[in-house]
Amino acid sequence: MTSRTHGIDEGWAWVVLAAAYSGILLMATVMFTGGVLYVKMLDYYQDDATKASIIGSLNSGLLCLLRIGNALSAVTFTIVLVYYFERRRNIVLTLSQAVRGIARFMASPLALCLLKQYGLKGTFLMIAGICAHLCVCAMICKPSVKEAIRCCVKEQAHTRTALSYLVQRLLFGSVMAVASKIR
């Protein structure tokens, strides 16, 4: 195996696969717990829909920010799998979408279990802890050799383009200066 394909479809790629699937699962699970939490907030505030709506709105605003982060994470977790797998890419990407479906099924029972065990405030803390684990999953998904080579080549091409432009400018400027002296 050549050094250009080292780590593709083997070794560290499987660790990245587990981290990416875990990240997708955690992220999607947190996104789908909102409905259960809203019902519990209604119970917590003794059916005062105004208070529950205000807190629900704040929660929705925070979840909106979280979803923006989740959207960026979901794309990143999927893209990193593309760089780490070639032969098994189709099945890996298909299963990454299946993990999102599994998270939909897990979200409500998990939220109910957390609410029963820790209460509303404790559940929000646990969800924050789940979100913090996304950082660990993201750190494991370092760039692959293939991606690093692609970025290096792109950077070198950009550097060569800039360097050739500077050389042309210097040479053209020198030629113009000499031409103006000859006139």
Image: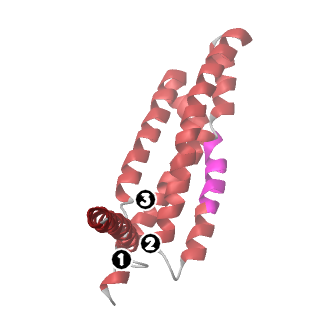
Disc 2 on helix, strand or loop? Answer: helix
**Structural distance between the alpha carbons of marks 3 and 1:** 15 Å
Q: Picture coordinates of residue 147 (x, y %)? A: 40, 69
Q: Residues within 10 Å of mark 1 (few under 14, many from 20)?
A: some
Q: Amino acid at mark 1?
A: Gly
Labels 2, 3: front one? 2
Q: Is residue 106 magenta?
A: yes
Q: Which residue is mark 2?
A: 84
Q: Is residue 144 magenta?
A: no
Q: Residue at x 52, y 83 (%)?
A: 87
Question: Does residue 138 appear to the left or right of 120 in the view shown?
Answer: left
Magenta segment boundaries in residue numbering: 97-108
Residue 19: image tag: 3
**Structural distance between the alpha carbons of marks 2 and 3:** 12 Å
Q: Are the residues flagged by discs 2 and 3 in contact, CB closer than 8 Å?
A: no
Q: Residue at x 55, y 33 (%)?
A: 65
Between 62 and 152, the one lying in front of the other is: 152
